Image: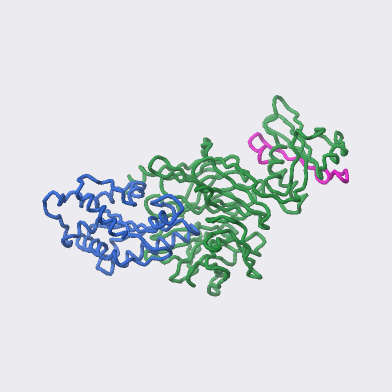
Amino acid sequence: MNLRRLTSLLITAMALLSATPATAQLRIEINRGVSEAVPVAVVPFGYDGPGQAPIDAADVIAGDLERSGRFAPLAADDMISRPSAAREVNFTDWRLLKTDFLVIGSLLDQGADRYLIRFQVFDVFRGAQVLGFQIPASADSLRAASHRAADMIFEKLTGTPGAFSTRIAYVSVTRQGEKDLYRLFVADADGANPRMISESSQPLMSPGWSPDGRRLAYVSFEGNRSAIFVQELATGERTEVSARPGINGAPAFSPDGRWLALTLSGQDGNLDIHVLNPATGQLRRLTKNPAIDTEAAWSADGKSIYFTSDRSGGPQVYMVPVDGSSGARRITFEGRYNARPRVTPDGASLAVVHNDQGNYRIALVDLETKSTRILTDGRQDESPSLAPNGSMIIYATRIAGRGTLAAVSTDGRISQTLAAAAGDVREPVWSPYPTY
Amino acid sequence: MQTKQLFVIAITCLLAVGCAKSTKPDEGAADAVGTDDGEISRQAGIDTGSAAGGTEYLEPGMLPGDSTLIQETVIYFDFDTARIRPDYSEALSAHARRLVGNQGLNVRLEGHADERGSREYNIGLGERRAQAVRQVLMLQGVSAAQITTVSYGEERPAARGSDEAAWERNRRVEIVYSE
């Protein structure tokens, strides 16, 4: 009976499905950028090859720079000239347009599905090149190569590595007649290329990336119980790694990718933090407290785990060493609700869900000073996740009754929304840097 | 108040034969589960037809009136608590008697939370509520082997919307029977 129920109810799309409904595509809008955004011109790239250029690389790069909130790209229509090689550049044109930096480039079709994206960045005031690079690509990777170019430009001009080549996993929920349909998506950081990796009529939740960006761990309630799966993104192959009695929740890969921190409750419903080695099945319990202990997050060095616990009454963040050498230590004290910690890449702060006078908001807790800085102004903001360069936090919010994704810079100055065309989207998780 | 409302709905169901789809808040969720287990417990009440002048059908161990009481399959909770309100004690006792008298019968307790706050923490709150109901049943002699719990946190709301009216219908434990 159980088996029949499983097959009849479960629509699990395992492989990376090529056909993705347009409704799942996220559209990014910048709500607030920095007033001193740097004026930059990304000139439409030259193209050397048959037919039309297969991609508008300059448009992808300009879009990335603009969405970062730190750059104000010049509209192509306002450009006086459109150089694609250094010898064609007349710096006077760009000084007239009050452009600080100029990006030019070209795309070469070398035949046999081989392309070359070549680009140069100039300091207009000094009239000198600050960066020049070429990236080989195939037709399939032209977009990724353009994002990588944007990453390099961003790093050269800001000193911070770009995160435009990263991806975002998120859960989408749409109403299908009487039922909800839960789907797990992976999209580019700019919302493009959404790919569905799992689908179920039962809840899917808590996606978490492996540190190499090749796998996702998540919770699925298929079969009327919770279980944790790890899925290979390239093949769609998934493995059930924990389906113990009670809760199997909140999976989080260790920085070395060998361990999963997770929440188990057992039959008696006492949620505690455990670490599991999925390869060997080795399982260790890290907390032993009658309270709710959940939402584990690894410290950058992999030696400690931050987690949510309501052992003091309301939920607060605690930390426990993974080697079990000492007990849990309380980390957050400001406010009556601090949950779902995520560590910033520099290890200095925690992004948390913080209750601010009845509103749930994303806040940053400085681990040294213990001070709390509230970054968002929604009523139900949750699920913070950090970009791997530490510049932005993506999170879930509600706008006009609908689940929507949003992002805010860790300095609070830049904010964006990432709206889906239909349904609710939630639980965004930012991928690590891609491995080249 | 909540109980009275449900009681009225239960009575209405008894009167209107074949009223399997009432407006009870658990209906949508039960459909989403697609389990026929929930339907079995409901049909037990419908089949008696006591309103038409028959006599109440009682399973082993059940007391007169229990077939009405076990129509109450959703226990609601106050904000941020897993404390069971005293007005549910009669209904839970009837469920306990039914389970004690029918060892072959199993029950799944589905805990839920409202949407506020962090999702995995809300899984914990839903579990705590399911465990509270489990404790009540076990204290009245139900075997642990007959009970499983699952917490859906805020993932499967019974009511849409972001107001107190929706939230109070979502803080709940659903009692789902299976053979």
Q: For chain B, give the colour.
A: blue
Percent across and percent down for residue A249 are 46, 58
Q: Position of residue A133 (x, y in %)?
A: 78, 42
Whether the magenta-drawn stretch holds residue A128 is answered as yes
Residue farthest toward the left in the current orientation of the protein: B54
Whether residue A254 appears in magenta in the rendering, the answer is no
Residues A417 and A136: in front is A417
Image quadrant assignment for residue A144: top right
For residue A231, side relative to residue A126 (left or right): left
Residue A163 image point, x, y percent: 67, 49
Q: Colour of chain A?
A: green
Nearer-the-camera pick, B49 or B60: B49
- The residue most toward the top is A51
Q: How many marks?
A: 0
Residue A422, image x, y percentages = 50, 41
Q: Is residue A1 left or right of residue B78?
A: left
The part of the chain drawn in magenta is A121-144
Q: Is residue A94 above or below residue A34?
A: above
Q: Which residue reaches farthest front?
A: B1
Where is residue A392, by image quadrant? bottom right
Left or right of A112: which side holds B165?
A: left
User: Between residues B124 and A239, which one lies in front from this camera angle?
Assistant: B124
